Amino acid sequence: MIRTTTIAAAVALAVAPAAWPLANGLSGCTFAAGGGPADGYVSGGYSFPLGPYFCLGPELGAGFGDGGATFIGGAGRLYLNRASASIAQPHLFLSGGLAVANDEVAAVDRADTGGYLHFGGGCDIDIPQSPVTPFFDLGAFVFPAREPQVGFTFGAGIRLNVARALWMEQRKRERLAEEKHIAESLARAREANSRGDYDEAIAVCGELLAAHPDREEVRELLQESERLLAESIPEPEPEPKPMPRPRPKPRPEPEPEPEIPTIPPEAVAAYERGKAAVSGGALGEAIYIFSAVVSECPSYGAARDALVDAYLLQGLDSYSRGRVSDALRAWRQALAYDPGSAKAQRYIDKAKRERR
């Protein structure tokens, strides 16, 4: 019984594999030590994943105590919980192979070589972000020889997940490269600000923020660049408001004749073309047409109102695309043509508050 206990105790290791992000038991090297009622053992092996729950690989070990033994075989391990967030990874194991017992006090006719079978269960303790996993096993063994023997074993050890170790090293290199890229891009944006090229700085910060939305230093530099760009744009000089036309004195007649409109037909036609351009989404063309009409006919109130509305729409379009400076420029033009426009002033105030 002592000799067979040594053999089966040495088999207590079942080699296990695990590829990230699953638990370590499915891919890697395993080292263990343990024993049975009277003997101990040391063992090692390697295992390969055959699926998300099962692994298989070779094992090799040696027993010590009252009787010595060496063994070689294969071990399979079935995991019962493969949730990557779980620290405890229970499993069942089954191993078998050839064992040689070296018992010098054994009788000559006693078999010391034969097959073995070892089975049981245990648990891996999967440490997050670490390629090393401790484990323990409890099992039963069968060593037939000439006189079948049955015993119990216990073992404990560690697994070294080669796949996870390589993955962690690769992630470390990627993070270092990413931090270097961010630092270089921020330096390029600051240099662009220093020479007054605010558009380039905004473009660089925008690309960084799209890839790394949680980087607060990128967001702060983007806001600073937009502020500098807004400060560099001169305020547009408002166009002088045309003098109101003098009203004719009422005639003594009992019913004065209604005032005849003095808007030229070509101005009216141009105004209609501008409205069609707005309907078609061609705001730039509409602004050009309305500006020409207002310049030629300053008293054409409908054309002036349409020009203000077109500038407001152009500003909203630029703002929705993230071009805050262009939006401010359009709204200030609207305010220049209609200083009493509460809507234009509200848009400008809102954009300025968001850029602080």
Image (cartoon, grey):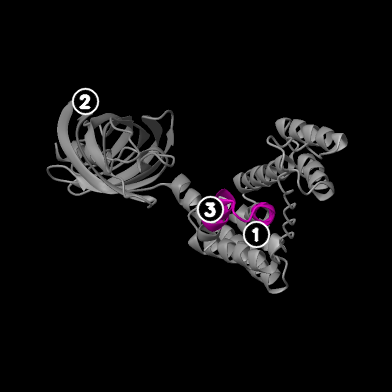
Q: Which sits earlier in the primary sequence, circle 2 or circle 1? A: 2
Q: Main secondary structure of the magenta part?
A: helix
**In the rendered structure, does residue 208 fall within the stretch colored magenta?**
no
Query: Depth check: 10 or 135 in front?
Result: 135
Front one among 249 and 319: 249
Residue 289 percent location from the top left of the image:
81, 41
C-alpha gap between disc 2 and disc 3 = 98 Å
| x and y, in percent, of residue 131 in the image | 39, 51
- The residue under label 1 is 202
* Horizontal side, residue 86 vs residue 221: left or right: left
Image point (51%, 60%), residue name: 353
In the image, what residue occupies the spot 78% across and 32% down? 272
Q: Residue 346, which numbered label?
A: 3
Q: Is 335 colored magenta in this rendering?
A: yes
> What residue is disc 2 on?
146
User: Left or right: where does residue 288 sit relative to residue 148?
Assistant: right
Q: Are marks 3 and 1 in contact (CB under 8 Å)?
A: no
Q: Is residue 84 above or below residue 50?
A: below
Residue 21: image x %, image y %? 41, 41
Q: Earlier in the sequence, mark 3 or mark 1?
A: 1
* Span highlighted in magenta in the image: 329-351
Instruction: Decide: few, some or many residues near mark 3? Use Cα within 10 Å; few <14, some 14-19, many ≥20.
Output: few
Q: Camera-side residue: 226 or 273?
A: 273
| Res. 287 mark | none
* Image depth: mark 3 or mark 1 in front: 3
